[in-house]
Image (cartoon, grey):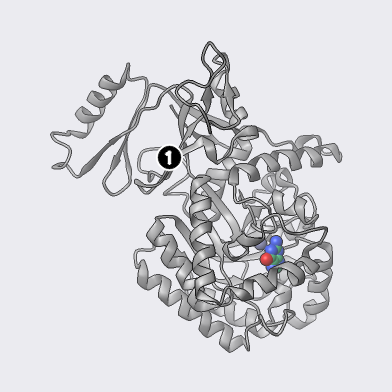
């Protein structure tokens, strides 16, 4: 079966179906209700005019799945810090600002050691791919060579990625800060040039302008990054917004509106004043926004990365996803590793569901997100956040084959998982569940053991042995 989001609250289920993927990784045919595998192949080949596989320009990949298995679009992690992976789970009782100083800056600084960076980044890519993440919006560090290495490794592994060299020239320890706005900008340009050089088509790796967050950037640096965004309008921008109340106070102190010409004293207005709030901007967190701030974000068509794992772990707050969606703001999911303790977007999806229930228990009855809705955020919502909505996120014809094969544990008569003695995962299927129920069991109990294989643009990038 093939399952993907048709709309925010609806999944499309294709059973007895087949999909043909071209050698360029594009979905060129989708056939449903075929009447068996042989008929499916026949239908596809007559439709595409296949004579023999190699001569037609189509690759021979036609997909059909077994019981308890389905194809699902690859997950899109719209916000994570590749450099923080060694710290997953390590945050104690800290909140954002002390967490940055205690745990995060020392680790990020240490990745200027190329051997260490290679070890960490290689592992992050393998780990996220094994959890079905086919596209990731990465923060690296301020170090250019290791940031470029992250891009090299993503390209080699075949993971789609936005790779950002982190810009920060204030309010950080002296061992981990850009020397000046000029130095920050030229380092950023260097990394952008490298990424464009290794993947000129930009189909797999793209650079992303990455002001860490307003408090860590001086006004001259934000000015320069806004100018860079205007000079390279195709480039995405990623940053953090309104994650923590202390952080918001800091922004008000550092950037009074009279100093920036901002329309008011809100956090969003600061980014806007520097030309950094655009339809290409990915804003992580967006928890404590005011009404008018949300309106500004919506007007600028900036996107939100919701990071429920991080927001819960470092006690930042509960973002009101329904409230954002109702205002017409595009939302995707982020793991925000290692503010979040898990590299899994599936974990982020179930935590989005749980956090939405906490928001509901706080009084907003409509806040609850369904399984269908969190899966939409993990795929199509994420695709829109990173600007790839025409390419990935569903299995419609013309989209690219970014997919994961999900396998659940189908129990036989004896209560054993058929054909597998071990490592079948947490999701047991008894045989009487509907497909909707199977998907719900996957969302709430699944993990990387259920992700049996992963493809990006038609290329097999992970297979569970
Ligand atoms: N704000 C500024 N830097 C960071 C970071 O590394 N993680 C999170 N969650 N928030 C931030
Ligand atoms: Zn973050």
Asked if residue 263 lies left or right of residue 4, the reply is right
> Is 31 rendered above or below residue 283?
above
Residue at the image point whose x is 63% and y is 67% from the top:
277
Residue at the image point whose x is 57% and y is 44% from the top:
378
**Quadrant location, the C terminus:** top left
The residue beneath circle 1 is 465
**Residue 203 showing in the rendered view:** no
- Nearer to the camera, 150 or 402: 150
Residue at the image point whose x is 44% and y is 55% from the top:
159
- Nearer to the camera, 338 or 111: 111
Q: Position of residue 281 (x, y in %)?
A: 59, 63
Q: Tell me the quarter of the picture where residue 415 sits.
A: top right
Q: Position of residue 297 (x, y in %)?
A: 67, 59
Residue at the image point whose x is 66% and y is 82% from the top:
177
> Is 272 rendered above or below residue 312?
below
Q: Position of residue 24 (x, y in %)?
A: 28, 49
> Is 302 rendered above or below residue 58?
below
Asked if residue 95 lies left or right of residue 398, the reply is right
> Is 267 rendered above or below residue 295?
below
């Amino acid at each position: 079966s093939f399952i993907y989001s048709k709309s925010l609250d609806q999944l499309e289920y294709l059973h007895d179906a087949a999909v043909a993927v071209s050698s360029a990784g594009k979905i060129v045919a989708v056939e449903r209700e075929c009447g068996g595998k042989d008929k499916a192949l026949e239908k596809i080949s007559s439709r595409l005019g296949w004579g023999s596989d190699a001569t037609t320009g189509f690759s021979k990949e036609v997909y059909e799945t077994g019981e308890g298995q389905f194809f699902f679009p690859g997950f899109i992690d719209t916000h994570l810090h590749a450099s923080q992976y060694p710290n997953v789970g390590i945050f104690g009782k800290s909140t954002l600002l002390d967490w940055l100083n205690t745990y995060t800056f020392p680790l990020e600084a240490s990745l200027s050691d190329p051997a260490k960076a290679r070890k960490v980044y290689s592992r992050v890519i393998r780990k996220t791919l094994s959890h079905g993440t086919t596209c990731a919006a990465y923060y690296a560090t301020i170090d250019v060579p290791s940031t470029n290495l992250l891009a090299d490794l993503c390209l080699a592994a075949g993971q789609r990625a936005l790779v950002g060299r982190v810009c920060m020239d204030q309010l950080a320890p002296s061992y981990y800060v850009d020397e000046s706005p000029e130095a920050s900008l030229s380092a950023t340009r260097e990394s952008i040039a490298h990424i464009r050089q290794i993947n000129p088509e930009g189909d797999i790796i793209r650079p992303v302008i990455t002001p860490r967050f307003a408090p860590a950037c001086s006004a001259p640096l934000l000015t320069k990054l806004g100018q860079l965004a205007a000079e390279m309008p195709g480039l995405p921008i990623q940053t953090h917004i309104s994650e923590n109340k202390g952080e918001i106070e800091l922004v008000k102190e550092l950037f009074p509106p009279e100093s920036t010409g901002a329309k008011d004293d809100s956090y969003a207005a600061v980014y806007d004043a520097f030309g950094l709030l655009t339809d290409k901007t990915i804003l992580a967190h967006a928890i404590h926004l005011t009404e008018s701030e949300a309106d500004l974000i919506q007007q600028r068509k900036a996107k939100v990365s919701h990071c429920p794992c991080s927001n819960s772990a470092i006690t930042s707050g509960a973002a009101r996803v329904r409230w954002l969606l109702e205002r017409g703001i595009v939302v995707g999911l982020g793991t925000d590793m290692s503010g979040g303790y898990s590299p899994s977007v599936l974990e982020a999806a179930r935590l989005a569901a749980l956090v939405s229930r906490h928001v509901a228990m706080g009084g907003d009855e409509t806040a609850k997100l369904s399984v269908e809705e969190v899966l939409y955020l993990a795929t199509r919502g994420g695709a829109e956040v990173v600007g790839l909505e025409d390419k990935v996120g569903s299995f419609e014809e013309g989209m690219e084959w970014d997919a994961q094969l999900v396998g659940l544990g189908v129990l036989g008569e004896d209560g054993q998982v058929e054909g597998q003695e071990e490592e079948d995962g947490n999701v047991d299927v008894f045989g009487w569940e509907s497909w909707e129920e199977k998907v719900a069991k996957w969302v709430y109990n699944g993990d990387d053991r259920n992700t049996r294989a992963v493809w990006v643009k038609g290329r097999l990038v992970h297979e569970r042995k």
